[in-house]
Amino acid sequence: MGIVFGDEGKGKVVDFFTPRYDVIARFAGGCNAGHTIIFDGKKFVLRSIPSGIFSENKVNIIGNGCVIAPDLFMDEAGELERAGYSLTDRLHISRRAHLILPTHRLLDRAYEQAKGKNKVGTTGKGIGPAYSDKAARVGLRVGDILSGFDEKYKTLKAAHERILHDLHYDYDLKEVEEKWLEGVEYMRRFHLNDTEIEINRMLDGGKNVLAEGAQGTMLDIDHGTYPFVSSSSTTSGGVCTGLGVAPSRIGEVFGIFKAYSTRVGSGPFPVELFDATGDKIRKIGGEYGAVTGRNRRCGWIDLVALRYAVVINGVTQLVMMKSDVLDDFPTIKACTAYILPDGTQTTDMPYDTAGCKPVYTDIKGWQTDITGMRSEAELPAELKDYIAFIEKALGRPVKIVSVGPDREATIMR
Ligand code: GDP
Ligand code: IMO
Ligand code: MG
């Protein structure tokens, strides 16, 4: 799982690990995610469909903890089918997953507009309103597609339209709604089943399941920088609730992070760089959102946030992505503590990180092109020192170092 603010490279890691697993399952989020996978000169950005879809003979599951927009799902699945990846036999969707209605997307935008400068900076995909309806026990579920759909849809849509009216939000639903309803029909061709039972049966039968996170720990509804978070449980606890597997079934927890930090949308970000160094990281790292195209905010690695994420998730192994992006920096900084607004220093994640100032340790950069390296032995000594520094601070081993976006550019240690 991603253990910072999302976009850590989860898609690449899941695709890389897929050959070792039988089942790949998304447990949280929806089309707010954008997971990039690059192999054999091809590039895909997945949003709701698990990143295991490119390997043959694997079951891919969209779990009950996810939310799904039928029209966008139809676009995404159609693109994969046109590229030669058949999905209907390999993609199973929980009947308990909730649907994102077109009016959820309108509400998302209307609420953001109403918040003005306090907006969350959401992806505008209707995630918050869909999860709110789930919690309010009025949501529409995938299982509803199979019975009583029309009535339930009309009731929920009418409730949304009343709110939109109260917010004086102008909209035109017709075209979007037509496509959405087409998407609902399209979904019927998939296995819409009780994936919770299926997944436990497969575990009982000795199959290996890889749970694919979306977003990151600092965007978790409980543990993130609330209210600047997404609306689901993005941490390892979310695997249990979002797939229906018991905590005792959880084995390795892969904590995926970048060699530096990024954040999209609003909210506190103590390590953010507003200078040329931040711009340089953004440019070299291609730090522009895979879903919204927005500039990602950039900064140095934040070991306070990472240490917290290691604990919250029970991370057993670390995966460091985009190490190559720091190839050209003479000095790299690592944030090891925060100075709180009252002047005291802490290494624990504060209740609120707004106004916190980072305390940095300087580390010598490697200033070597590592993108062609494929083994630990080739890695420059300064990069190994950087990794050792992170391992010591987090108390967990870095088992994978990613040195480029391609599936092949991955070093196991
Ligand atoms: P995800 O949401 O966690 O799956 O990550 P995204 O796909 O949103 O963002 C990660 C971006 O970094 C994508 O454009 C990837 O192709 C790219 N990427 C992944 N790993 C590496 C790496 O090691 N080096 C570089 N330069 N790019 C990488
Ligand atoms: P992946 O899976 C990065 C951010 C949004 C916003 C906040 C709430 O690709 O890592 P939402 O639309 O979920 O209500 O937005 O969360 N956000 C992400 N940032 N990566 C993601 O997903 C994100 N999904 C949501 O930018 O700040
Ligand atoms: Mg992403």
Image (spheres, grey):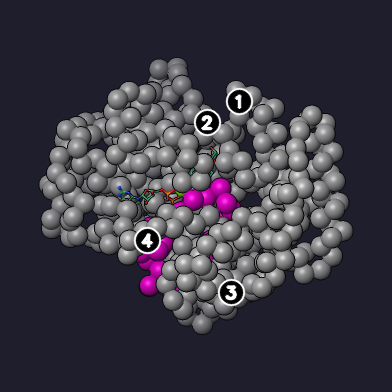
Question: Residue drawn 72% across and 39% down?
Answer: 107
- The residue wearing badge 3 is 88
Type of residue at label 2? Answer: Ser
Ranked by sequence position, the earlier of labels 3 and 1 is: 3
- The residue wearing badge 1 is 118
Q: Say which of marks 3 and 4 sits in front.
A: 4
Q: Residues within 10 Å of mark 3 (few under 14, many from 20)?
A: some
Farthest bottom residue in view: 205
Q: From where the camera sits, is residue 318 visible? A: yes
368 displayed left or right of 228: left
Q: Considering only vertical position in the picture, is 179 above or below 278?
A: below
Residue 51: x and y, percent? 46, 62
Disc 1, disc 4: CB below 8 Å?
A: no
- Magenta residue check for 27: yes
- The residue wearing badge 4 is 42
Ligand 2 under 8 Å from disc 2 Cβ: yes
Residue 299: x and y, percent? 35, 32
- Report, in whole angstroms, how far the alpha carbon at label 2 lies from the one at label 4: 32 Å
Disc 1, disc 2: CB below 8 Å?
A: yes
- Magenta residue check for 33: yes
Q: Considering only vertical position in the picture, is 221 above or below 14?
A: above
Q: Say which of marks 1 and 4 sits in front.
A: 4
